Amino acid sequence: MATLIGCQGCDMLVDLTAMPEGGRANCPRCGHFLARYRSDAVARALAYCISAAIALVIANCFAFLTMGAAGLQTTMTLPETAIMLYRYGMPDLAILVGGFILVLPALALTLIMAICVPLTLGYAAPWLVDSARVLYTLNEWSMVEVFLIGVIVSLVKLSQMAEVQLGYSFWAYVAFSVFFTLAVSTLDRFHCWQRIEAVQLS
């Protein structure tokens, strides 16, 4: 199996033949992060992925936040963040918001499961290679944490103009963000490709 990895920072080829458990590899030339090895990385990523999926479902089923001012009260759910933008004549922005905070993360979770389940069972599924390619491309466009930070900043400003109550959906999305980030970061790119190559050769 291939043991060389190209540094994304300086294109140097680095040999990662022997990495200890929990070891982290950085490029010897520029210091760019290359890979991290954990023997149970696939099982961990699958567990985080399932937890993230449960949290995402809960986040879509309850109120995200409730705002009250001058005797009026408005409750908004997570899907309505994109729907309201569409209703106010901003369909392009609505598609971007809905895509980056709901559709793409859900697709990424599906891909992680499609990769981790066959690898855990030692099954060379025909979709492994394509799923991994799409997943590591989508990771560059993940905006889950960016959306969450934006919401927190907005809440600080809104709290000065209206009474804001956070719903179950908000806390579920916080949990989803944590589990999603852990799932993506745990499934190391280099060792994931090694595991895929191993099951295909076995």
Image (spheres, rainbow, N blue to C red):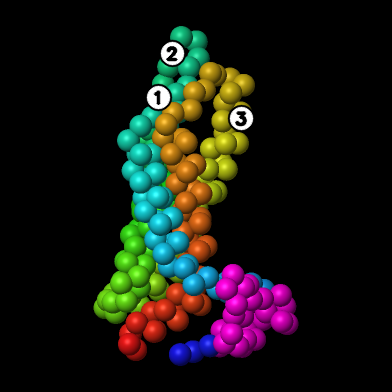
Residue 192, horizontal then vertical, whole percent: 45, 75
The N terminus, quarter of image: bottom left
Q: Which residues are magenta?
A: 4-31
Label 2 sits on residue: 72
- Residue at the spot 55% in from the left edge and 48% down from the top edge: 146
Label 3 sits on residue: 156
Label 1 sits on residue: 75
How many C-alpha atoms fall within 10 Å of the one at disc 3: few (<14), some, or many (≥20)?
A: few
The reply to whether residue 87 is in sight is no
Q: Secondary structure at mark 2?
A: strand
Q: CA distance from mark 1 to mark 3?
A: 17 Å
Answer with the quarter of the image where residue 115 lies: bottom left
Q: Is residue 63 above or below residue 69?
A: below
- Of badges 1 and 2, nearer the viewer stands 1
Answer with the quarter of the image where residue 107 lies: bottom left
The C terminus, quarter of image: bottom left
Q: Nearer the viewer, residue 39 or 201?
A: 39
Residue 33, horizontal then vertical, whole percent: 64, 72
Residue 122, horizontal then vertical, whole percent: 32, 76
Q: Earlier in the sequence, mark 3 or mark 2?
A: 2
Q: CA distance from mark 3 to mark 2?
A: 20 Å
- Residue at the spot 42% in from the left edge and 79% down from the top edge: 195
Q: Secondary structure at mark 1?
A: strand
Residue kind at label 1, given as amino acid type: Thr
Residue 144 tag number: none
Query: For residue 13: magenta?
Result: yes
